[in-house]
Amino acid sequence: MTTSEPLPPDAAVDLHLHTRYSDGAWRPADLFATLTQGGFRVVSVVDHDQMEHLPEVSALGAERSIVVIPGTEVTTEWRGLAAHLLCYAPLATGFTSDALRAVVDDTRARMLANTQMIYDTMLARGYHFPRQQEALARDGQLNRAMDVGTLLLAHGYADGPGEAMRMVNEAGYQQALAPIAQAVAAAHASGALCVLAHPGRGEGEIHRYEPAEIEALLAEVPLDGVEVYYPTHSTAQVAAYEALAARHGLLISAGSDSHAPNTRQPVPYPARRIAPLLQRLGVTTQQ
């Protein structure tokens, strides 16, 4: 769906959502039912390292009068550090070439190959998963290495998530990462804007990017923006990232990173907070 009427300044927007197409547990239809109940006007579903979700979520948005910005979250690295990159395409054009799709397809293929290797290793070690179809979100399909951890937990082979992931790591887990400069170049060639996701998060495999580190990144890679508004960012972090964006002319984004109905829910950020980004993507906001 596109928008012709400017959004009210407080219209609810959330540009960071995930579904079963990647590592989320949301069924797309259930996610959009929740978004409708919450009065959301503009959203982006940015499932990791693929674009297969785009037709379904666009159709669901059109059915429910919710504007859906085409997007994906690319798993990248910079100087050996993980960096998640939100790529958004304008409503008027969508992604204009296959350059970014080629990058995410390669990343996903490497990720799936590693996941299958870990799964096969577990089978060779004598582990069996008869309840695989009910344990995994997408009808038993393996999407990511953490799915093998989920199977270990569901079948009583691990006492908790930490032990499950330790077993996965010992079986040969490796992150599949695209160089961030390559991903940004491909996104720009596809007509998309690139936003550094949740820079202040910093746990597990996610690296926390302090403002000075982002400035060093900007000296090498032409990012378009930063996800300033994020549920776990502190007030001090928000202020620091706002100041960084102002110094470097970066666009500001906002997203919940909601993955499942039983965990963090979509967050109704007011459109005025990210009006310049929305404008670049084809959505105007009342002044």
Image (spheres, rainbow, N blue to C red):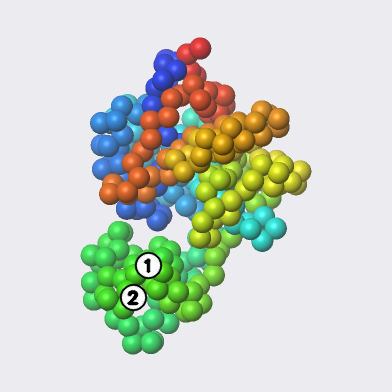
Quadrant assignment, res 148: bottom left
Q: SS for tag 2? A: loop
Q: Is residue 252 above or below residue 201?
A: above
Left or right of 245 in this view: 216 = right
Front residue (pair 208, 37): 208
| Picture disc at residue 161 | 1
Q: Name the kind of residue labelled 2 in the image.
A: Ala
Q: Name the kind of residue labelled 1 in the image.
A: Pro
Identify the image quadrant of the N terminus: top left
Q: Position of residue 251 (x, y in %)?
A: 60, 31
Q: Residue at x 37, y 67 (%)?
A: 161
Q: Position of residue 57 (x, y in %)?
A: 36, 40
| Picture disc at residue 82 | none
Front residue (pair 149, 69): 149
Left or right of 99 in this view: 15 = left
Any part of residue 56 in sight: no
Circles 1 and 2, Cβ within 8 Å, touching? The answer is yes
Q: Residue at x 35, y 29 (%)?
A: 40
